Image (cartoon, rainbow, N blue to C red):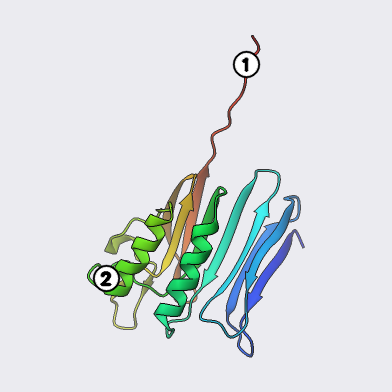
Amino acid sequence: DDFTPVHACRTGRARGVSMYIKNKISFKICDAVEGDMDFNYVSVILTDIRLKVGVFYKPPRFNFKNFRDRFQEILTIEKEKLIIIGDFNIDLLETSNLDTISYKNIVQMSGFNIANNIDNKHATRFTYNGKPSLIDHVFNKRLNCSVKVLDDAIGDHRQLSIDIRQTINILGKK
C-alpha cells in the first residue's frame, strides 16, 4: 500500500520489468518499451531530486545486434543524472566474449560508469552447476553510486543494494 508499481511487460508472457516507488516520492513515467521486442525498459524521473531511474530486462535468447542498436540509441540521448538497473543476461565475467565487450564499450562510450564490481565474488547469479555469472548490472551517469551484492536471493538472482550519494551545492551569503 505504501508503493506505486510501474511496469513494462512482454506481450503474452509473464516477463518484464517493474519498479515500486514509495508513495511519498513524486515521479513521472518517461519511457516504456514493452511488447514483443528484444528487451523491456521503463524509466521514471524522481521529480523532487531530479534523478532518472531506468529498469531493463533482456531475455537470455535475443538478437544481440537489434538489442545493441536500440540500447545504444537510448543511452546516447540520456543527458540527465541517471541510474540504470537490470537483468541484461550479458555476463560481465566473460571478458573475452565479443557481445560482452561490445556492450561494455557502448555503456562507457555513452558516458556511463559500470557500478558493479566485476569479479566472481560479486556474481549475481550461479548456474545450475555452480558457475558464477554477473548478469544483473547497475550503471550510472553523473552520479556517485556503489553496489553491494547481498547473499539473499530472489529467485535465482542475488539481490543488489545500491547506495547513491548526491552532492548538494549550498550557496553561502556574501
Disc 1 to disc 2, how far (Cα)? Answer: 49 Å
Q: Residue placed at 62% from the left, 62% from the top?
A: 43
How would you rate the neighbour count of disc 1 (Cα within 10 Å): few for under 14, some for 14-19, many for 20 or more? few
Element under label 2? loop
Q: Is residue 109 left or right of residue 50?
A: left
Q: Amino acid at mark 2?
A: Glu
Element under label 1? loop
Q: Amino acid at mark 1?
A: Gly
Between 148 and 151, the one nearer to me in the picture: 148
Rendered view: 56 above or below 75? below
Say which label, 1 or 2, has the lower sequence index: 2
Where residue 165 appears, as percent x and y from the top left, is: 51, 41
For the C terminus, the quadrant is: top right
How would you rate the neighbour count of disc 2 (Cα within 10 Å): few for under 14, some for 14-19, many for 20 or more? some
Q: Is residue 65 visible?
A: yes
Where residue 111 appears, as percent x and y from the top left, is: 43, 51
- Contact between marks 1 and 2 (CB within 8 A): the answer is no
Where residue 54 appears, as percent x and y from the top left, is: 57, 61
Between 140 and 153, the one nearer to me in the picture: 140
User: Which residue ends up furthest to the left in the rendered image?
Assistant: 96
Count how many numbered circles sit on residues in the image: 2
Q: Quadrant of residue 128?
A: bottom left
Q: Which residue is mark 1?
A: 172
Q: Residue placed at 55% from the left, 82% from the top?
A: 37
Where residue 95 appears, as percent x and y from the top left, is: 25, 67
Q: Which residue is mark 2?
A: 94
Q: Quadrant of residue 22?
A: bottom right
For the N terminus, the quadrant is: bottom right
